[in-house]
Amino acid sequence: MTYIGVDCGTSALKAVLVDEDRALAQAERGYRPDNPHPLWSEQDPQVWRAAMFATLADLRAAAPRAFAAVRGLSFSGQMHSAVLLGAEDEPIRPAMLHNDGRAHREAAELARDFPELAREVGVKPMAGFTAPKLLWLARHEPDTFARLKTVLLPKDYLRLALTGEKLTDMSDAAGTWWLDEARRQWSPAAARAAGVEPSQLPGLVEGCAAVAALRPAAADKLGLPRDCVIGAGGGDAAVGAVGLGAIRPDDAFISLGTSCQLILASDVYRAAPERLVHSFAHALPNLWYRMAAMLNGAGALAFAARLTGTDVAVLESEAAADYRGPGDLLFLPYLSGERTPLDDPYARGVAFGLTPATTRADFTRAVMEGVAMTLADARECLEAVGDSLGGVGLIGGGARSGLWTRMIAAAIERPLVRYRGGENGPAFGAARLARIAATGEAPAAVCRAPEIADVSEPEPSLVERFAKRRERFHSLYRALKPEFSATD
């Protein structure tokens, strides 16, 4: 039996075809969000749908017999984004993405007017969440808001294209700021606060549930069996945990994609909004997780590659040569603002300490070090609310980099574990959810840790140098914070 996982990310859509626990084929289609105005980050949902159909066609071409035997398909997706559908279930405007900061005033108003809701919905409202975006829409695009019939998340829009059903799961709903996390149901008070009617929210299911039949026309077009089970799927953070087997209390991992997160699984719901820690429902029943969420991860290195006209792999190779630890060049990686621990949509990327002798490799190292230092901040946020981290897994596209692995291990002062196939974490996790939905197997039997590729222990010399550089890193942000939000 084979299964497919589809991961709708910020910069690419990935699909993987697996058997019981091994990737048979994988495919990817890249894209770039649109930034038509400062703080805006948007995407036409049709781009995701076209990418999904293209990657599924690639899987079929790569492994036709395994593809024809697919028993289940499920999803992972970027969280918080607002996909706004009208009466015909078609988008009425571009989706507003998780790293869109335009609704910062609306988020501040929600925090001011409804402070009691933060513990119910898992975190204080921030600009990237879905709820503030809807307040912004009502205020700035009232004609569009009047046409709104349903709000979906990105992966749910893709499932709609295959099944015609409008649903979401607990883990993706968790990032909207509308979910009562402990009760795992929509919060009427949070929906009212954002001006949303219950009828505009999709139905709720668990991430491992079988939710709808594949449309015959879609099955025939794709070459999938008509009885292929379609699963609910989940938000990329939670589904990455499923792929990694991080479903037991205190299992911890870093997901280093375009954005990055430090995540700790839990069998109890415990909110800590005062530290900007996100306490969210997991993609599996009776599980939750606490997360420090950063808006800038491997996307910062991709930015450096675009800026220099060089491939990411070339930059990483140059930076890794004779690496001895952070130098004098600092880089604040806040290209899209920042969430944990700053809650600052105005923050921006800054290179500080450039000289005539600065090389491309120096710049690349500084970019990667900046991301590593934000992950050290993330560790401190989780530990400040009583969590204790031992070894930490690493997944996502950034997990390919041996240099970044060394940097992060030193910055967070914890052993870092990489897994074979870990760069496909959310897509692989989605395939596991498809398997559970199709077979009814117990999650613990399916969600085992993959084979370990390597373990990076913190190198004492790097630990010392990162600790010193973090003092300057924080000082630089504090000095520039007033300038970030200054207006002409």
Image (spheres, helix red, strand yellow):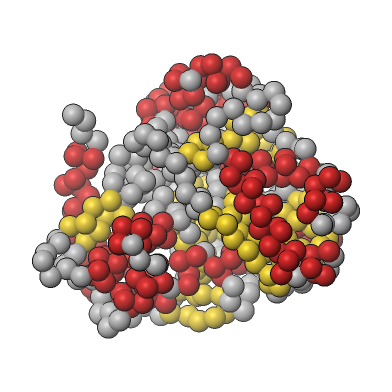
Q: Relative to the observer, which residue lies in front, 409 or 430?
A: 430
Task: Identify the residue at horizontal 58%, vertical 65% (top origin).
Answer: 424
Q: Is residue 485 visible?
A: yes
Coordinates of residue 328 in the picture (x, y in percent): 16, 67
- Expressed as whole percent of the image width and height from the top left, the position of residue 71 reads 83, 60
Q: How many discs mark residues in the rendered view?
A: 0
Q: Quadrant of the C terminus?
A: top left
Q: Is residue 235 visible?
A: no
Quadrant for residue 159, please give it: top right
Residue at position x 17%, y 57% in the image: 352
Q: Quadrant of residue 143?
A: top right
Pick the residue in front: 310 or 331: 310
The foreground one among 394 and 39 is: 39
Q: Residue at x 55, y 48 (%)?
A: 78
Going by the image, does 391 lie left or right of 228?
left
- Which quarter of the figure is the N terminus placed in? bottom right
Residue 481, relative to residue 282: is it above or below? above
Task: Name above or below for residue 112 compared with residue 71.
Answer: above
Is 481 positioned to the left or the right of 414 in the image? left
Seen in the picture, residue 137 relative to 82 is either above or below; the reply is above
Residue at horizontal 78 percent and vertical 42 percent from the top: 163
Instruction: Tell me if residue 97 comes above or below residue 112 in the rendering.
Output: below
> Position of 61 compared to 124: left or right?
right
- Residue 20 lies, in percent from the top left, at 77, 72
